[in-house]
Image (spheres, rainbow, N blue to C red):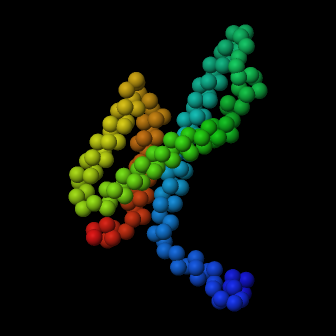
Amino acid sequence: MFWRFKRSGICFLDIIMKLRRHDFYPVLVIITGLITSQIIFTFVVFRSNIALYSKLSAIRDAGYLIVPNLHIVNTFMEMAPAFYGGLFFSLTAGSGITWVTLLLVLTWISFSYRKIILVLILVFWGVLIIFTNTQGINLPASSALIIIPMVVGYSVYSMFDKKAARV
């Protein structure tokens, strides 16, 4: 009774059940990409905080005044600052990588000459990784540019209806 309007007889559950499963595919793919990027970037920020903590501890032990102060430096060994830093990178770079991968895989699926499109996408992504590493190997950015597209691409391809793609 709670779910029905008294006059119209419309049921909220009926409306929800009428939504097709594929209506939520892009949302699921974006959430998958953001969770993947959050894991990667939290690890990257945590490793960076550990390295910064050791350098600032050495400076402090030498007798110099350190910036940021001692109260902030002590939080570098905790997971919360790394999580929030990873959240920043996840919502900026991670969401961008996720959206570009989603659009590229949907473009690849929608065309009938998939091999040519796949080669162009792989060349584009390879050039992007090479430009990221022009001034030396940038392992955090390279891992994000490799792992996030693999997870997002697999989730897009596995959720997509293969029969509809061959129209």
Is residue 46 shown left or right of residue 113?
right
In which quadrant of the rendered view does residue 39 lie?
top right
Nearest to the observer: residue 5 or residue 141: 5
What residue is shown at x 63% (from left), y 22% (from top)? 54
Q: Residue at x 32, y 42 (%)?
A: 124
Could you tell me which quadrant the C terminus lies in? bottom left
Position of residue 139 measured from the top left corner of the image (x, y, whole percent): 45, 32
Instruction: Quarter of the image for the N terminus: give it.
Output: bottom right
Q: Which residue lies furthest to the right in this view?
A: 71
Residue at horizontal 42 percent and vertical 41 percent from the top: 145
From what the image shows, is residue 143 above or below residue 50? below
**Residue at the top extreme, as displayed:** 63
Q: In this view, does 21 lie to the left or right of 108?
A: right
Whether residue 153 is visible here, answered yes or no, is no
In which quadrant of the rendered view does residue 58 lie? top right
165 lies above or below 121: below
Whether residue 50 appears in this view of the structure is yes
Q: How many marks?
A: 0
Q: Residue furthest front?
A: 7
Residue drawn at the location 50% of the way across and 55% of the way down: 30
- Vertical comparison of 104 with 144: above or below: below
Coordinates of residue 45 in the picture (x, y in percent): 58, 34
Horizontal and vertical percent position of residue 151: 44, 51
Left or right: where 79 falls relative to 144:
right
